[in-house]
């Protein structure tokens, strides 16, 4: 059996599979959805910022810890207070039921 071809997303995101506690198949579904979003776009190119936003949105739904780890790098928090504000937003969303627990 031939090895699966690495995707553009996984090649540009080393260690992505170590982030998600829910397993490789769930992360593969994020990668596939984001790649489909890019491929089916009527625009010739998609900015990396839009791709990053798609990944973050889906990670937030799948695994909050993986989301925070990805966001801490992707969003380039300037200091601990920015990081804490994002964590507080997650906690509030979970408390109000607008974010399901993974």
Image: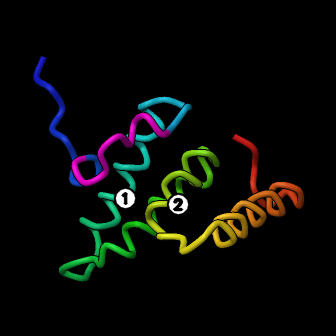
Q: Quadrant of residue 2?
A: top left
**Residue 52: image x %, image y %?**
41, 66
Dot 2 corresponds to which residue? 72
Q: Residue at x 80, y 57 (%)?
A: 91
Q: Main secondary structure of the magenta part?
A: helix
Q: Report the residue that reaches farthest toward the bottom.
A: 43
In the orientation shown, which residue stands out farthest toward the right?
96
Callout 2 touching callout 1 (CB < 8 Å): no
Label 2 Cα neighbours within 10 Å, binned few <14 / some 14-19 / many ≥20: some
Q: For the magenta stretch, what is the residue range?
A: 11-19
| Left or right of residue 41, residue 84 in this image | right
Query: How far, Cα to Cα, is label 2 from label 1?
Result: 20 Å
Does the stretch in magenta take in 61? no
**Mark 2, mark 1: which one is toward the viewer?**
2
The x and y percentages for residue 82 are 65, 72
Q: Which mark is residue 64?
A: none
- Asked if residue 15 is positioned above or below residue 88 in the image, the reply reads above
Name above or below for residue 30 compared with residue 23: below
Tell me residue 94's x, y (percent).
Answer: 81, 55
First of labels 2, 1 by sequence position:
1
Q: Is residue 96 left or right of residue 10?
A: right
Residue density around tag 1, few if under 14, some if 14–19, many if 20 or more, within 10 Å: many
Q: Which mark is residue 34?
A: 1
Secondary element at image label 1: helix
Which residue is rendered at x = 78% and y = 63% of the image? 88
Residue 13 on the magenta segment: yes
Q: Quadrant of the C terminus?
A: top right
Q: Secondary structure at mark 2?
A: helix
**At 53% from the left edge and 51% from the top edge, which residue is drawn?**
69
**Position of 68 relative to 17 (above/below):** below
């Amino acid at each position: 059996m031939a090895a699966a071809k690495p995707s553009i997303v996984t090649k540009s995101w080393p260690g992505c599979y170590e982030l998600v506690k829910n397993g490789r198949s769930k992360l593969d579904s994020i990668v596939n959805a984001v790649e489909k979003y890019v491929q089916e776009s009527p625009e010739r190119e998609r900015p990396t910022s839009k791709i990053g936003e798609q990944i973050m949105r889906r990670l937030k739904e799948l695994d909050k810890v993986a989301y925070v780890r990805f966001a801490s790098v992707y969003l380039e928090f300037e200091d601990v207070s920015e990081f804490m504000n994002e964590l507080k937003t997650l906690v509030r969303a979970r408390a109000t039921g607008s974010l399901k627990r993974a």
